[in-house]
Amino acid sequence: MKKTLILLSVTSSILLANTPLELLKTKCASCHILTTPTASILPTLKAPAIEAVMLHLKVIYE
């Protein structure tokens, strides 16, 4: 049941977003920073910077 609710939530978020950039800013940016991290903010990061995530996705899907 919990997995179903998560799936529905993610799916509806994707379908209701106007653009990929809007989806990125509303969903991903709450944890991932959208700029290159500086040394001063590294200890406060919740998740890897979006650049790192995209790099790993590119490597996986190439």
Image (cartoon, grey):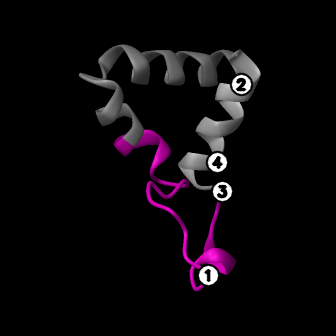
Mark 3 residue type: Ala
Q: Mark 4 to mark 1: distance in Å?
A: 15 Å
* Sequence order check, earlier mark of 2 and 1: 2
Please report the bounds of the magenta region as a residue range: 25-46
- Circle 3 crowding by C-alpha within 10 Å: few under 14, some 14–19, many from 20: some
**Residue for badge 3:** 47
Q: Secondary structure at mark 1?
A: loop
Nearest the camera: 38 or 22? Answer: 38
- Left or right of 47? Residue 60 is right
Q: Secondary structure at mark 2?
A: helix
Confirm whether residue 1 shows in the render. no
Q: Are marks 2 and 1 in contact (CB under 8 Å)?
A: no
Task: Write down the quadrant of residue 35 in the picture.
Answer: bottom left
Single out the residue that lies furthest toward the bottom. Answer: 40
| Closer mark to the observer between disc 3 and disc 2 | 3
| Disc number for residue 39 | 1
| Closer mark to the observer between disc 4 and disc 2 | 4
Nearest the camera: 19 or 6? Answer: 19
Mark 1 residue type: Ala
Tell me the quarter of the image containing the N terminus.
Answer: top right
In the displayed structure, 32 sits above or below 39; it is above
Q: Secondary structure at mark 3?
A: loop
The residue under the point 27% across, 24% down is 19
Q: Are marks 4 and 2 in contact (CB under 8 Å)?
A: no
The spot of residue 61 in percent (x, y) is 70, 16
**Residue for badge 2:** 2
The spot of residue 3 in percent (x, y) is 72, 20
Q: Mark 4 to mark 2: distance in Å?
A: 29 Å
Q: Mark 4 to mark 3: distance in Å?
A: 10 Å
**Residue for badge 4:** 52
* Sequence order check, earlier mark of 4 and 3: 3
